[in-house]
Amino acid sequence: MIQMIQRILPHHPSRRTVANRPRVEIIRRWVETADERCPVACVWFALPEIIADQDDESESPRPAFSSFRLKAGRLHPINNLPAPSILVQSLKNSIHTIAAILLLTISLVVNAQEQGLFNDRPGRPAKLPEAPTPADETAPTMFPHSETSRFYIAGQANIIFQAHGPFHSPYEGPNSLLARGEYKPSLLGTLYLGAQLRRDPRTETDALFNLETAAGRGISEALGLAGFTNLDVVRNPTLGSVPYMARAQLHQTIGFTDKLVESIRTPFSLATLVPERRLEFYVGKMSLPDYLDINSIGSDSHLQFMNWTVDNNGAWDYAADTRGYTYAAVAEYDDKVWSARYALALMPTVANGIDLVWNLRQASGQNWEFELRKPLLGSLLPPDRKGVVRVLGYVNHAHMGLYRVANQAFVSGEDATPEITKHETYGAVKYGFTFNAEQELTSNLRAFTRVGWNEGQHESLRLHGSRPDR
């Protein structure tokens, strides 16, 4: 790894004496995992003092980051938006600079985690996740959150910079990926607020509210790719970056046993102890991927993958407006090793539309999911290697068009071009199924898969590029 970093960073020994130029060094450090310790390289910049002699290197400076620890089974990518001045430099220097900044930032984040900033009890080592389920992992944070306060406040900002070079495209159209080279940044910021109205674990009641802003655009205005590479982009530039209400809902827990199990506090559930057998209700404005098709490895573009069809099943045409939200009611029953969920949600008036149909007799989205928390490979792996299987089915009743009708109208000469939106009717039905599984292979390696199918004859309404993340 050290040799790889040395190849990335530019090496100019003759320039070390230039005034005000940072000195880049590679410090060998050790990473301790659950089973071994291995060497890595920690990159740091020693900025020279203005008065000090730049050639004097008699005193070796202390590294800015004296330790580096890697949390097994979790990847935390950091997205950086380069300044405009960097963009005008050569591609080679840009890559060197960005690589150095990324390595430096990762060292800072992980070192902060070592010091206890990610834990309510400073100095306690980070605990490795016991299972690949979302409840077993604490989301990374810059500041510790109270586990006992009645109130919850948190924030998250995600900056994604993407670019592509020019390529040959003889059939380019208005909705194609642009053939010319381009670059686009995006910014998604969310403020999470919550309050426990009732703190009894068996009858917990939470009030949840999120304020969000989405700025920037994706490459080619988020067009030209079926599985778009940036989930934070909204495919409607007229909406602007004005803050909007993302979520506003009530969460109610009804326990069926006195046995309590630990639960990680999240923006969607504030309790730290919950009944092992319980029924939970969520009612209000929400995003269905907050509760369905969840995968601890591939469900959060802020920390994991950014591709639309990886973070969610591409065959799941879930109810949502342009920004990825809807008004819905979700019921979930949780037992020791399994869970069952049902969601009823409002559908948009048109594909990629911001307005929703409030008459459930005209349009609605219904979703069912069953989750089994058991190993997928049985005796092939040790019993402590846990796994999860989720099967989801959905039925959408909405104002949709039928592709067969649109094609027939074009062939008969009724339409000059095939146009699905000219043949939309209420009462159209679209349905499908998805399979979602994840398995812990070793203490440092997990695998996941998603497989989906839908009937494909009716128009898809989930055409937005933005999908709010858990």
Image (spheres, rainbow, N blue to C red):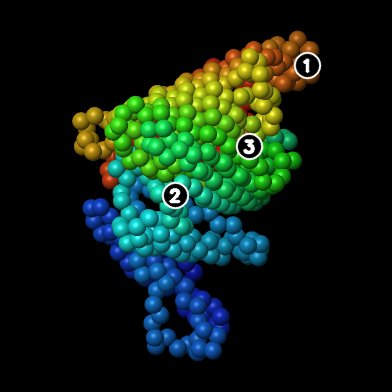
> Which residue has dot 1 on it?
415
Q: Which mark is residue 149?
A: 2
Q: Earlier in the sequence, mark 3 or mark 2?
A: 2
Q: Which mark is residue 354?
A: none
Disc 3, SS: loop
Q: Amino acid at mark 1?
A: Asp
- In the rendered structure, the answer to whether residue 44 lies left or right of residue 176 reads left
Q: Residue at x 38, y 36 (%)?
A: 201
Q: Residue at x 73, y 36 (%)?
A: 174
Give how far across and how far down residue 33 sits, in percent.
Answer: 28, 55
Q: Amino acid at mark 2?
A: Ser
Q: Amino acid at mark 3?
A: Arg
> Which residue has dot 3 on it?
323
Along the line of sight, the residue nearer the viewer: 451 or 275: 275
Mark 1 surroundings within 10 Å by alpha-carbon count, few (fewer than 14), some (14 through 19), many (20 or more): some
Q: Is residue 52 above or below residue 290?
A: below
Q: Is any part of residue 169 visible from this angle?
A: no
In the picture, the quarter occupied by the N terminus is: bottom left
Q: Earlier in the sequence, mark 1 or mark 3?
A: 3
Give how far across and how far down residue 210 sits, in percent.
Answer: 58, 43
Front position among marks 3 and 2: 2
Front position among marks 1 and 3: 3
